[in-house]
Image (cartoon, coloured by chain):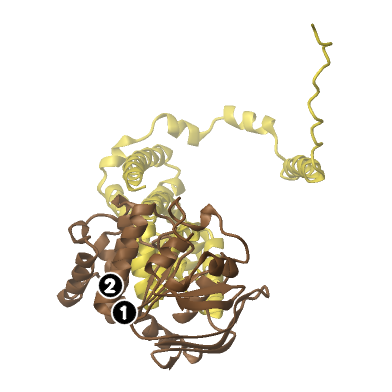
Chain colours: A brown, B yellow
Amino acid sequence: MIRLVDATVEYPNGTRGLDGVTLDISKGELVVVVGLSGAGKSTLIRAINGLVPLTAGELYVDDRPVHQMNRRQLRDLRAEVGMIFQGFNLVDRSTVLNNVMMGRLHHLPTWRTLFSLYPSADLDIAAESLERVGMLERAHSRATALSGGQRQRVGIARALAQQPKVILADEPVASLDPPTSHAVMQHLQSINHSLGITTVINLHFLDLAVTYGERIIGLRDGRVVFDGKGSECTPAVFEGIYGRSLTSGDTLSDEAPLG
Amino acid sequence: MTTPATAVELPAKSPPSRFTIWGSIAAVVLTVVTAITVEFSFLEIVENLFRRNLVVEGLLRPDISQIWSERSARAFVETLQLAILGTASGGVIALPLAMWATDFGNPYPALRATVRTFNAVVRSIPDLLWALLFVTAVGIGVLPGWLALFFFSIAVVSKLTADTLDGIDRGPIEAAQASGASLTALLKTAVVPQILPAYTSFLLYGFELNLRASAVLGLVGAGGIGARIEFFRGRGEWSEVWGLVLMFFLVVFLVERLSVSLRRRLV
């Protein structure tokens, strides 16, 4: 489903977000990417939907070459790849429904978007997505009226409304408290299991990674330094990925479930 | 035990920078030189004030009846129409112009530079000059007045809107891009909702400015109440002029109060 061959992203300042990454993610997989900040997690996710272009190497989504796509083709690709953000990225002044409808924009003619004349079929898809994350009754609330966890669920619904083949989540729980974090992760897990959508999630809490990551990819300095099952991840493995001993800041809960 | 009273000293203040010193000197010198070269004199002002002055005498007995004169009333309505029409048309154009000047609203650097240059040129021309240009181009009347306010509104509203756009939340823009939205759809759903209250308030502010400007426009032949004021001024009928000015003052005052209270609700 997602294939990277020697993928490299070098930023204008010379730092390498990705450094010769070769990866294969199959359809329906749930992959958690871990690594210190600056290890290339965000770059990897943004390369997959073409928000960050590769400077060398190849990247395929659904066998289509992302590294060769023009603006138009990238938009078509992104319509099939839902994205979930750390900061939720909702329009605060708009309603929950209008935020979720953003996921349908690619499928709508511009004049309909301009006058907010959404076809009922698309509204149904949005409602269904909201229902799945338990936010349907808040459809007409303003996004500002929601708590952090609710906002992220709306963010998930927006991605779902795209009816995506792939879901990319960039630190989806980094701004949330522990119980809410688990709730959001469970939503992502159940979506992956029931809809079979290939899911790539960046996390920096290692206990969450072990709990939800069926496959874990460890990045360090833009390179893949670990790729294996969540059950294989011992503290020693994470110390290898991080290049230092683990601290209490590396896990969500205060106990040490990794030990 | 008492400790000897050693005076606690504040660290020395850093002296004013060279920029501050020379800047202040330059400002004073510039003011003095300017005053001398334009032959500014308080004495002259005072002398003129106590001479027999028709303009000031007219001010003491303004002709309020102008308020009920049909021609003046019609000119007034014309001024209001000019202000509304100019604001609405210019304001609508200003919104895309402001958005096309931003990096997220316009992915083509050359086109972005063109829009920015156009905006800068429009902003640098004052309302009265617009009126003069259009009076020359299309003749005396309401049309040049409307055209002048149209461009003036573009200048004011696009400038203020552009400043607001600089500070909006980029998150929703990234979300729209990541969902494959077209540029227009992105602007409509991720940008416009964020700036709508401010933009509406800028429209009202533009209307206030236009109402005042439309009085002056008449002086150069661009229609409205200004044309009427200019008519009486030309005939030296200062009581009538002041009657109209008084009436104009009242209308502008009312409209501004209304506009200010509306704007407060928006933001």
**Does residue B85 show up?**
no
Task: Tell me which corner region of the image, top left, top right, bottom left or bottom right, holds residue A123.
Answer: bottom left
Q: Position of residue B266 (x, y in %)?
A: 33, 48
Q: Is residue B128 left or right of residue B147?
A: right
Does the residue at mark 2 contact the one at mark 1 (Cβ under 8 Å)? yes
Q: Is residue A3 left or right of residue A132?
A: right
Q: Position of residue B241 (x, y in %)?
A: 40, 42
Task: Tell me which corner region of the image, top left, top right, bottom left or bottom right, holds residue B139.
Answer: bottom left
**B240 and B22: which is toward the camera:** B22
Figure quadrant of the N terminus of chain B: top right
Q: Residue at x 25, y 48 (%)?
A: B70
Q: Residue at x 68, y 30 (%)?
A: B43
**B13 and A53: which is toward the camera:** A53
* Tag 2 and tag 1 share a subunit: yes
Q: Position of residue B252 (x, y in %)?
A: 36, 43
Amino acid type of the residue tagged 1 in the rendering:
Ile
Vertical relation: B225 (above or below) A246:
above
Give SS at disc 1: loop
Q: Chain of mark 2?
A: A
**Does residue B13 show up?**
yes
Q: Please, which residue is most extreme toward the front here? A: A259
Which residue is labeled 2 in the image? Answer: A191
Neighbours of disc 1 within 10 Å: few (<14), some (14-19), many (20+): many
Vertical relation: A5 (above or below) A258:
below
**B30 and A236: which is toward the camera:** A236
Which residue is labeled 1 in the image? Answer: A197
Amino acid type of the residue tagged 2 in the rendering:
Ile
User: Which tag, 2 or 1, sits closer to the chain's start?
Assistant: 2
